[in-house]
Image (spheres, coloured by chain):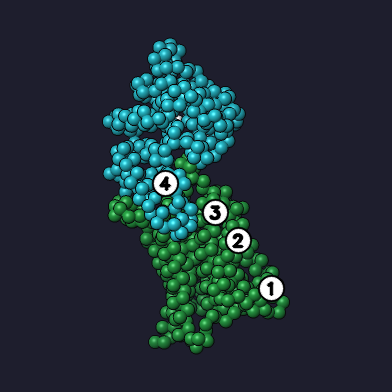
Chain colours: A cyan, B green
Amino acid sequence: MTEPILQTRGLSRDFGPFRAVDDLSLTIQKGSITGLIGPNGAGKSTCFNLLTGMLAPTAGQIMLNGQDVTRQRPDQLFSAGLGRTFQIPRPFSRMSVLENVMLAPLNQTGERIVGPFLRRARVHDEEARIRARALEVLDFVTLAPLADHPAGQISGGQMKLLELARVLMGDPELILLDEPAAGVNPTLTGILIGKIEELNRQGKTFVIIEHDMDFVMQHCDPVIALAEGRKVFEGTAAQAQADPVLLDAYLGAMAHG
Amino acid sequence: MIGLLSYAVFFTTVASILAIAVLGLNLQWGNTGLFNGGVVAFFGAGAYGTLILGSAAQPDQFGGFNLFYPAALIGGMVVAGLLAWVVGILTLRLRHDYLAIATFGIAVTFENIMRNAEWLSGGAKGIRGFEQPLRDAFGGGLAYNAAFLAFVVAALIAVYQFLQHLVSSPFGRLLRAIREDEGAARSLGKAPSRVRLTAFITGSVIMGLSGGLYATFYAFVSPQDVLPTLTFQIWAMLIVGGAGNNRGAVLGAFLIWGAWTASGWSLSRFAPIEAQLYTGSIQYILIGSVIVGMLLWRPQGLFPERLVVSQSGKPGATKKQGV
Ligand SMILES: Nc1ncnc2c1ncn2[C@@H]1O[C@H](COP(=O)(O)OP(=O)(O)O)[C@@H](O)[C@H]1O
Ligand SMILES: [Mg+2]
């Protein structure tokens, strides 16, 4: 499979005089698990914010499945099949874990104000189905026992898993994960990787920002490295490990910092 | 005895009418996180709307539509909803604090228009509306007041049931998500602006119903009925009762209205004559202190919001938050 699902051309973003993302041209292949690496402040999260419409680019173009989606809103992009998680989790704190996940499915009949009144039976059936699936997804990320807890009161690592559960529930074909393993304990990280690879086999494409080099080298292909907003490397994990510049400048620094 | 009973009927009628407005605010603030600082504008739109639509022609006075009462009441709600639609389109993009100030300004503007547009609202002397509906059938007096109370309570129950069903539905879930983190909701494909507007209009229509019932009860409305005080009282009711909890909203209305009435009565009974001039101000200070105390020691209110949980397996099952 070498069909691009997402492409950017000359993507840039300024914060005042500071250029956080600089002339970035990326191609993400359908069915891949792309690793996005680089030191803190390299512009990785900003890049996700641009791709998902949460920030407007200063310049450049974004194509999703061949369509120009530059400047589309986040909700439009999610509907078009592009989901993401956040580096710092953003749970709906005063809602239960289960509700957080049940929110995600698109176009629920009961989301329109008249739905719950005029289409009671249909909303009821949909809710039953969404609830069952949400519990499955929570089970998948090992959060099922916490389904009834307020999402604001679970641990940071659990919040990262909740973010993943939410985005999976919406069923996008391309999923951007911002440091999914940060704060998640090693056992869960192992499970998480297993899940990502399973979903990948089912056809989902992933872009993963991750600092854990073992994680990236074992599970991501290709690997893209950013530094100061620019792309400084793109290649296979093996090439990344063999690249002396990358090794010195980033991998070494990251492995020790 | 009859005196006490009459008073109880009167008190419960007014408290129930205000409880409806508190429920409307709870949909906006408690569920959606919209800070409406101008509740009284929508309450007033319902009150003036109902009386203007329902009364017979009067000299030099806009109106004379003489609508059948239920149509006038619904018309008042529509007027409140239209006002909310316009205000919502203009202000709902604002952040909390700006939204609060903008809506407060709209309420003050509304009061000023009602005070000055004599042709429309009767100006400072207000509008004397239509006689209370079905008054003759009950022969007036206590029997009528009890019947009117039953009508108001029925309206309160209907609004309560409507909102309970709404907030336990996917629509309610969407409102809470937008309240908690609008950006995260967007990233999950939700478009908050339309949902916020829908919640704002719906809450305002409920406030309009409250205003319409209030005006019907007194058969009169004047600018004195749409002062910022009322917004303040309705907020106090919601904060004390518990934002996000409809039961709390209703209870808060009864408690605060009770406290307000009781403090007024005690001051007129026991306070020195010189202090009685300031009864109103003293009441504000008391209620203000209750709000501040509540926010300090029990910010979630007497009846905290309940978490929607799954245990019973049926939608809408709830459990206390903070397990
Ligand atoms: N909203 C913002 N306003 C100003 N500067 C920002 C903003 N977001 C990110 N930055 C800056 O942009 C740079 C890249 O940040 P970020 O994309 O979060 O880096 P990374 O995720 O690679 O660690 C950092 O220097 C950061 O301070
Ligand atoms: Mg980052």
The chain identifier of the residue carrying mark 4 reads: A
Badge 2: how crowded within 10 Å, few (<14), some, or many (20+)? Answer: some
Give coordinates of residue B220: x percent, y percent.
58, 77
The chain identifier of the residue carrying mark 1 reads: B
According to the picture, the residue beneath numbered tag 4 turns out to be: A103
- Element on which disc 3 rests: helix
Tag 4–tag 2 contact (CB < 8 Å): no
The chain identifier of the residue carrying mark 2 reads: B
According to the picture, the residue beneath numbered tag 2 turns out to be: B83
According to the picture, the residue beneath numbered tag 3 turns out to be: B197
The amino acid sitting under disc 2 is Leu
Q: Nearer the viewer, mark 4 or mark 2?
A: 4
Q: Disc 2 beta carbon < 8 A from ligand 1? A: no
According to the picture, the residue beneath numbered tag 1 turns out to be: B62
Q: Earlier in the sequence, mark 1 or mark 2?
A: 1
Could you tell me which residue is drawn at 52 percent across and 52 percent down? B196
